[in-house]
Amino acid sequence: MLHYANPQNFLNLARRLTPWFFGAGIAMIAVGTYLGLVIAPPDYQQGDAFRIIYVHVPAAWMSLFVYGSMAVASASAFIFKHPLGDVAAKAAAPAGAVFTALALATGMLWGKPMWGTWWVWDGRLTSELILLFIYIAYIALWDAIDEPTRAARMARILCLVGAINVPIIHFSVEWWQTLHQGVTVFRTDGPQMPASMLTPLLIMALGYTVFFVGLLFVRMRTEILARRLRTLRLNIEGAFA
Amino acid sequence: MRAFTALLLRDIVLSLRSGGGAWLGAGFFVLIIALAPLGLGPEPALLKSAAPGLIWIAALLATLLGLERVIEPDLQDGTLDLLRMSALPLEFVVLAKVLAHWLTNGLVICVLAPLVSPMLFVDAKALWVVAASLLLGTPGLSFIGTAGAAVSAGVRRGGVLLALIVLPLNIPALIFGAGAINAVQHGSDPRQALLLLAAFSLIAAVVASLAAAAALRLNED
Amino acid sequence: MSFFDMGGYAAYVWPAYILSALALTVLGIRSWRALRRVERLVALSENPEKQT
């Protein structure tokens, strides 16, 4: 395991694994889409509109999973002073923001036929929206600081503060919901679904996760090489100075 | 302890002297409250029901003011390097800075809010909840805000970034604070919301002082 | 034909799937292109003579 903490060894490993993760992820998403759109029976209450679940719930799951991964990566960078953790967190953030935006967009597309409006201040949608703001702030902090080491350190701290705050925000939003009743939340709890509906959901969620890992490898390789390029250029400029 | 007091006094004096100081945040707070009827209309029932949210949104925005001047000048003029080398732990440096910001910003808002709330037709018997919620919540806002300022110090035009970082993290204070005033306006017990607000401020105090101290320690090239 | 109709919910189901597919595809392609670009630049910087 420690072997791959070396950026060069990690690059080699990631280069070999990337196509497999992309391939497996895309295949699973394709199978899940087929099962979800064609094989799964329509819901007895929501009809075919419930099929949006197969793109909504995996995106929502990823929005949390990616932030969790970023927090773990930032914490390990903080504790072990290892740059690979910062690279992973930075590379994951835009993907996480896209998943969060997708969860919001598909949630709205689901809400329109079910609630009759595009937007409801439902606990989950609201938390998801706030999470999107936190992703944007994290990405903006990286962009705002020119010097990579300093940017990495500050982003690490922000990511961890956000990770502690996200559950608190979620709790406060839930509390706020009980205060202003009247919004019906659709049930997306898995267990009471029949297997023909649940299986595609699990395959999709797994497919999204595997696809994300492939994406993460590509983005981390980009980031590591970009840093190498930066040092190379600084050396060249130094040689001519 | 003497170093702590000296730093606290220095920061208070600096913030009072620089461009309006404490009155900037307070003025901004009152301005937002005064703008609300102009946008929403003068209907007392509407303003009264919007008051809890308006007061707390105004508090969230007003505490943003002055945050840029909490860490940034010390980073620019090298004071931060001296503070890093001093015997006073950086967590206490942060504490002094938060306290200075709160005394010149949050506290002033706490005092002013019950005075201007009647303009939004908040009942006299709800005014103590307005004051209490702000007293319990604004320290949390200052803590989170200072952590945001420490993380974004040294960034060009960091003000917008600071708002982008701090506002989402302060949402729980908005919810619990407005919730407390809302509760008392509807005749229910505001104590649960106030307790949650106090809990938020306590957690913010612990997390934000550690985070801000870490940021000050590492904020060097 | 009823498959494309989605029981009357076509206007919601299809955009949700198309949007998801589009977003993930764009994300994948953009990330991949950025990697190709930086790989080329690194190769160029390490062997400047090979420039043609």
Image (cartoon, rainbow, N blue to C red):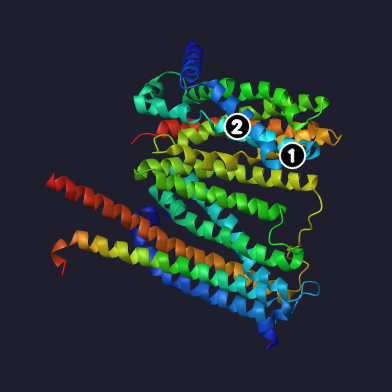
Q: Quadrant of the C terminus of chain C?
A: bottom left
Residue at x-position 67% and y-position 55%: A125
Image mark for residue B141: 2
Residue sticking out furthest to the top: B2
Dot 1: chain letter: B
Q: Residues within 10 Å of mark 2 (few under 14, many from 20)?
A: many
> Which residue is more in the foreground, A176 or A86?
A176
Q: Dot 1 lies on which element? A: helix
Identify which residue, B118 or B142, lies in the foreground.
B118
Identify the image quadrant of residue A57.
bottom right
Question: Residue shown at 50%/30% (left/top)?
Answer: B67
Q: Residue at x 48, y 22 (%)?
A: B93
Residue at 53% across, 50% down: A135
| Disc 1 target residue | B50
**Quarter of the figure that contains the N terminus of chain C:** bottom right
Considering only vertical position in the picture, is A127 above or below B125? below
Vertical order, A184 against B155 (above or below): below
